[in-house]
Image (tube, rainbow, N blue to C red):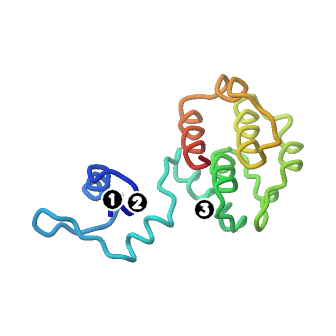
Amino acid sequence: MAKALSLSRRTVVGWLESGKMTGIKVGNRWRVKEEDLDKFIDEPNMYFNDYIHRARFVELQKLSQGRSREIVSCIYVLACLRKPLDEFVSAGEIDVDGIAKATRFWGPLERSLVRAALALYEPSETTTINEVFLNLDQKSNLVMQQALRLRW
């Protein structure tokens, strides 16, 4: 399983022992059902600020029906914002201009997260690392690190 996921054996065993991945231990070996492995692979295993962040992410993922790295990383960041932006997400696309206009008067932290999210989705959206990370708090920093892992 570790080879199939391109991970170390230690990582997979750690996930099994912590309950992050479902499996049973038989002797000194772990067994994982194929459907549990499929579910684990399909479900994003990522950091969420809180339950609301995860719930918004799931909702935005349903709205977007997107599986691409660009869409998933973008909606992951958008989901952590206090104000929902659901109206700008539709099947297979994100309304970049609409989000930019709707959030232009938000505070520096939220604007930084929005700019970063849009840059993850639309490479022509320009933003610099300094513009993003200088305004982030610790939780937002973790969100951005996860989004970058999702994107690349």
Mark 1 against mark 3, which lies toward the viewer? 1
Compute the Cα span from label 1 to label 3: 27 Å
Quarter location, residue 22: bottom left
Relative depth, front residue between 103 and 149 = 149
On the image, the x and y values in percent for residue 109 come to: 70, 31
In the rendered view, would you say 135 is above or below 144? above
Q: Which residue does the image show at 18% across and 66% down from the upper left?
A: 25
Which of the labelled discs sits on residue 2, or is there none?
1
Quarter location, residue 123: top right
Q: Do the residues labelled 2 and 1 touch (CB within 8 Å)?
A: yes
Disc 2 target residue: 5
Q: What element carries label 3?
A: helix
Disc 3 target residue: 58
Q: What's the amino acid at mark 3?
A: Val
Q: What's the amino acid at mark 2?
A: Leu
Q: Which residue does the image show at 62% across and 48% down from the upper left?
A: 151
